[in-house]
Image (cartoon, coloured by chain):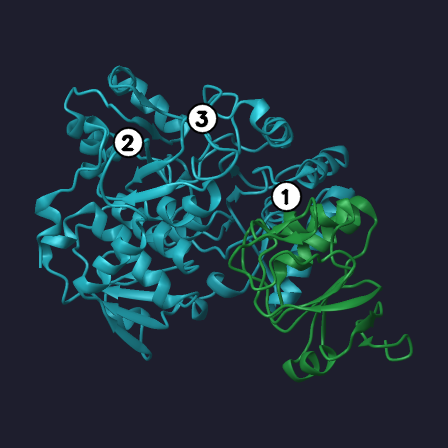
Chain colours: A green, B cyan
Amino acid sequence: MTVLHAGIAQGPVLLLDEPLSFWGAYDPRSGIIIDIHHPQKGQSLQGKILMMLESRGSGSAPGGLAEAIRLGTAPAGIILVQADINLAIGAAVAETLYGKACPVLAVAAQEFHELSKSAYLHISHDGRVGPSLDDA
Amino acid sequence: MPEGRAHQLAMQLVEQAARIMGAPRLIPISFAHIDACFYTGRSHVDFVRFLLDHGATLSVPAWTNNSVASPDDGGLRPERSDPEMVSGAHELMELYARLGCTPTWTCAPYQLAGGPKFGDHIAVGESNAVAFYNSAVGARTNKYGDYLDVACAITGLAPFAGLHTDEGRRAAIHFSCASVPENWMRQDIFFHLLGHVVGRQAGRRIPAISGLPKETTADQLKALCAASAASGGVELLHAVGVTPEAPALHAVFRIGETFDVITGHLNAARRELSTFNDGPLDAVALGTPHFSLSEFSELVKLLDGRKVKTATYISTSRGIREMLIAKGWLKLLQEASVIIPVDVCTYYAPKIQGLRGRVMTNAAKWAYYAPGMLGVEVCFGSLKECVESAVRGAVWRDPALWSNP
């Protein structure tokens, strides 16, 4: 497990079947996936613990995430397998500007698989994740 | 390094990126190209305001990428089309100029004098510029997303990882063009199509491409870089015998897959990049990435004093426009009814006025993005096909081009 950006969060789990770009494929004003090619188009990320194996790369992704955090439409936290700089930078900038945390973690594939079975997850500041506060 | 919260934040972001990339240290950079000046939301304005309010200064020359809308583009994106985006874009341009950026407002900064040279470590965000600087110039950059690009420019530092290192620049897949007929390789359209094929096959792997002519031009490399960065995410490509790090294949590629490019792949790419192939046209869009002076020279020759019947937009930088004025070409193009937006690109929303319906382009990158971004139909063709079609008001196909084997 690697903490890409630290923070405390909890929320219902949303497991994405495919990677999502935070720019173009997602509308920060509504918090909804808008990419017509994404199987979960129409789903809201707001307040969720977002789980996806990796982020789809876009140089504008940090701004997309920061804007969502500003507007309160962002996921509560993000759990990946593939470490992603853009989401970490977007979360870090938003925390500095707006004082709101959105932790971003990268975990091993096996751990990701186990965690994705939970309906609800907690993330602790040091990056522990679990279905209850004790586990996190 | 000056003290202050802006510099602290910049250093924090660069160090955070270095930790995630596993970089053992930071290295000094000599140049940055800023992408965070492209308005995508209020957070972009808040970020640069925070930096200015907390004493940020730049450590290296930092040139700006395209804006969403420019006070200098003739009102092609008027404020009423999307008040938040258009006014936000103008505000960002002003703020980044105040931060000390060089106001180039171009996605093709490598077409202007005074940029980075072979071996320079730099920080760039725009995908086609990342690929061009790495490949054609031999400067070294990873693709730095928004905010990190500015953080690198403020600190003058970047994480020593990925494409900054020698090991990180080796090719992992080889494309052989030995089977492509020579007459194809003399066409500008070939490099757009090859880029599309290479990006699709390579994904994010570094490609080495053999068999290209020694006299491959900067414009052709630009097309190759932009198309492969759009369809696949290529950040560096080696063209053997053409780009500076690849005098021979073995210099950049030892083991891995070899992909034989045949004309069938190129024809398939051409079909994939078009949603229609004939009939009337509503607009022609050229200049993605921004048109160069040599491309304008070719265009003036092809127009040969004729006027366009279809609304024709050619995006370029204010720097290149200055050169057009000096050559007397801007007047010629205006007389031909050609519209030349500066500082911006035409493939993203809010739409340029008049850009709708059935659009022809010579840029694989434009053809790749515009149908999704703008909801237009697109017909992809060579520069000559685009010019002839613009003059006629309907798609014209070059028989010499498509009757080839």
For label 3, the crowd category at 10 Å Cα-Cα, with few meaning under 14, some 14 to 19 and many 20 or more, is few
> In this figure, which residue is indicated by the disc labeled 1?
B154
Q: Relative to A55, say whether A65 is above or below.
A: above
**Rendering quarter of residue B375:** top left
Parent chain of label 1: B
> In this figure, which residue is indicated by the disc labeled 2?
B293
- Residue in front for this viewpoint, B160 or B145: B145
Q: Are marks 3 and 2 on the same chain?
A: yes
CA distance separating discs 3 and 1: 37 Å
Res B185 visible: yes
- Residue in front for this viewpoint, B109 or A106: A106
- List the single residue furthest toward the front: B279
- Residue in front for this viewpoint, B269 or B327: B269
What residue type is disc 2 on?
Answer: Leu
- Residue in front for this viewpoint, B194 or B153: B194
Res B3 visible: no
Q: Are marks 3 and 1 on the same chain?
A: yes
